[in-house]
Amino acid sequence: MNWSDIVWPEIGQATIDTLIMSGVSLLFTMVLGLPLGVLLFLSGKRQLLQHAPLNALLSVVVNFFRSVPFIILLIIMIPLTVWMIGTSIGVAGAIPPLVFAAAPFYARLVENVLREVDPGVIEACQAMGATTRQIIVGALLPEALPGLLAASTVTAIALVSYSAMAGAIGGGGLGDLAIRYGYQRFQPDVMVITVLLMVVLVQLLQIAGDRLVLYFTRR
């Protein structure tokens, strides 16, 4: 391995691109996935908005996107991505597939977290005459906050992994750098550095997530 041949500015830019892809995708994933997960929970059996057909439809949609391998989703979404943002490559081109892959995953995590909330909390709110919206915003989500933060951490780490796979179709970031230099140009030193950077990024995300969960659990 010839460390002197490493283009450090490109590695720095690739790291920034990975952070942008993961961060923007996480934001849109939470915006879409949180309401979807709440609706999945509320429309379930013996819940506030019990509606079996709606729950079944949402489950089918969520399970469909969760079952499609991300590398395949990247390819089949190319026409939609081009229609949405005008390109299917680079950082911008990777964000729509990342969101479509992560939002259903996050929604299912949200649903599972809400199931762990003590049913007595909802019953107490109903007894006080609270509306469904008041129960969700004032009791259900605050009670589930530590679990939701943990789910967000898991999703953020998954997005970092997905963003690396986006490099297979020119998505930019560390994955793209690893493929172009580490694989296609036979530079294992670049591959090692990109892997180490991904590991460090995941570790930092996990540490930050764990601290947030601990902080809000103690409160």
Image (cartoon, helix red, strand yellow):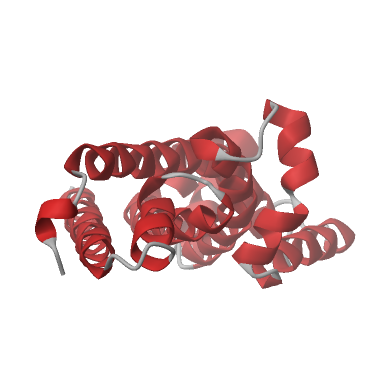
**Residue at the limit of the structure toward the right, as seen here:** 53
Q: How many marks?
A: 0
Q: Position of residue 215 (x, y in %)?
A: 16, 50
Q: Residue at x 29, y 36 (%)?
A: 13
Give 28 or 121, whichever is nearer the viewer.
Answer: 28
Residue reaching furthest to the left? 4
Q: Residue at x 44, y 64 (%)?
A: 184
Observer-nearest residue: 60 or 110?
A: 60
Task: Residue 21 in the image: state x and y as whole percent.
Answer: 44, 41
Q: Is residue 164 above or below residue 16?
A: below
Q: Position of residue 90 (x, y in %)?
A: 52, 38
* x and y, in percent, of residue 115 in the image: 53, 66
Q: Is residue 78 above or below residue 109?
A: above
Q: Is residue 169 left or right of residue 172?
A: right
Q: Quadrant of residue 168?
A: bottom right
Q: Is residue 96 left or right of residue 171?
A: right
Residue 71 located left or right of residue 3? right
In this rendered view, identify the residue nearer to me: 28 or 94.
94
Q: Quadrant of residue 185?
A: bottom left
Q: Where on the picture, by quarter, is residue 15?
A: top left
Considering only vertical position in the picture, is 163 above or below 81?
below
Judge whether residue 125 can be spotted in this image: yes
Residue occupying the point 51% across, 63% down = 109
Q: Is residue 135 visible?
A: no
Say which quadrant the N terminus sits in. Answer: bottom left
